Image (cartoon, rainbow, N blue to C red):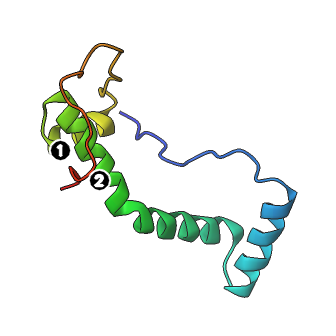
Amino acid sequence: MPRKDERLAIPALGEYYNDILTVDAWVNGRTKVVQAQSLLCAKLQERDKLIKERVEYLAKKRGITFDEMWEQILNGTAQKIVPGEGEGLEYKPGDEG
């Protein structure tokens, strides 16, 4: 079975951001593609904790574990909750952990 192409296709950046990326890549001695990949990875590292907190919230709302929610998201089977579902769980300040 052929391997799925895992490359991302993103829309054009717009003139200003394209210029900034071009200059940033040149200053760092990289291609624009490599620099864009590096910047995206850096931003995801910054957001890692926040992303995991949000997945934990969604898992609790569904009554499943973090790992189950994470796996469902990764394999494409996670479902959005429709109005009326998950109403027993309310967020209250201080419930963060």
Q: Residue 28 appears at what percent x and percent y? A: 67, 85
Q: Are circles 1 and 2 on residues that touch, CB within 8 Å?
A: yes
Q: Residue 94 appears at what percent x and percent y? A: 23, 53
Q: Residues within 10 Å of mark 1 (few under 14, many from 20)?
A: some
Where does label 2 land, which residue?
52
Kind of element beneath mark 2: helix
Tell me: 1 left or right of 19. left
Where does label 1 land, which residue?
66
Residue at 21%, 37% (x, y): give it.
59
Residue at 69%, 73% (x, y): give it.
31
Q: Quadrant of the C terminus?
A: bottom left
Q: Is residue 34 above or below residue 80?
A: below
Q: Is residue 29 above or below residue 76?
A: below
Tell me: 4 left or right of 75. right
Rendered image quadrant of residue 72:
top left
The earlier-in-sequence mark between 1 and 2 is: 2
Tell me: 47 left or right of 28. left
Residue at 48%, 66% (x, y): give it.
41
Tell me: 56 left or right of 65. right
Q: Quadrant of the N terminus?
A: top left
Residue at 41%, 67% (x, y): give it.
45
Residue ranking furthest to the front: 93
Instruction: Identify which residue, 56 or 19, lies in the foreground.
Output: 56
Amino acid type, label 2: Lys
